[in-house]
Amino acid sequence: MILEYKSRKFKKQCEDPQKAQLEYGKAIGTKLTQRVGELKAATCLLDIKCIPSARLHRLKGRRADEYAVDLVHPFRLIFKPILQENGDIDELESISIVRIEEVIDYHGKQKS
């Protein structure tokens, strides 16, 4: 898959294990770089759906155009699909570009 990021600084935090661990702690930083590696290696979001521990899920409400994968509970990695022509947000096999937005604790503690 093709990955885009909300900023260059955030890209470095997501891709560099040392920077990820420094910013988010060892457990979350390690899982973050693992999940980013899985996204890079995938051909589409359907590949990520096949990783049970990632628990890929579409968000709801004001974030209905985003997906998330689990990091270390309760933290999630949030990203938006960049849809190709005739793409559908519900067709995982058609999503091959995502924009990584943030690492967040759904219970209120934002980390990026």
Image (spheres, grey):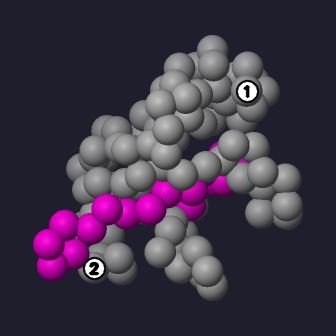
In-image side of 16 versus 23 (left or right) = left
| Residue shown at 43% from the left, 34% from the top | 37
| Along the line of sight, the residue nearer the viewer: 108 or 32 | 108
Above or below — where is 12 with respect to 2?
Answer: above
Residue 36 horizontal/vertical position (percent): 47, 38
| Residue shown at 52% from the left, 25% from the top | 12
Say which residue label 2 marks.
88
Q: Does residue 46 appear anywhere in the picture?
A: no
Q: Secondary structure at mark 1?
A: helix
Say which residue label 1 marks.
23
In-image side of 21 versus 55 (left or right) = right
Q: Secondary structure at mark 2?
A: loop
Above or below — where is 32 with respect to 73?
Answer: above
Q: Is residue 76 magenta?
A: yes
Residue 21 horizontal/vertical position (percent): 70, 22
Q: Give the total number of marks visible in the rendering.
A: 2
Above or below — where is 46 with respect to 4?
Answer: below
Mark 1 residue type? Glu
Residue 2 occupies which quadrant of the picture? top left
Spot the residue most to the top.
18
Mark 2 residue type? Asp
| Residue shown at 41% from the left, 52% from the top | 99
Disc with the residue nearer the chain's start (2 vs 1): 1
Gap in Å between the C-alphas at discs 2 and 1?
34 Å
Q: Does residue 24 appear anywhere in the picture?
A: yes
**Mark 2 touches mark 1? (CB < 8 Å):** no
Q: Is residue 79 magenta?
A: yes
Residue 34 horizontal/vertical position (percent): 53, 33
* Crowding at mark 2 (Cα within 10 Å: few <14, some 14-19, many 20+): some
| Residue shown at 66% from the left, 47% from the top | 103
In the image, which residues are magenta? 68-87
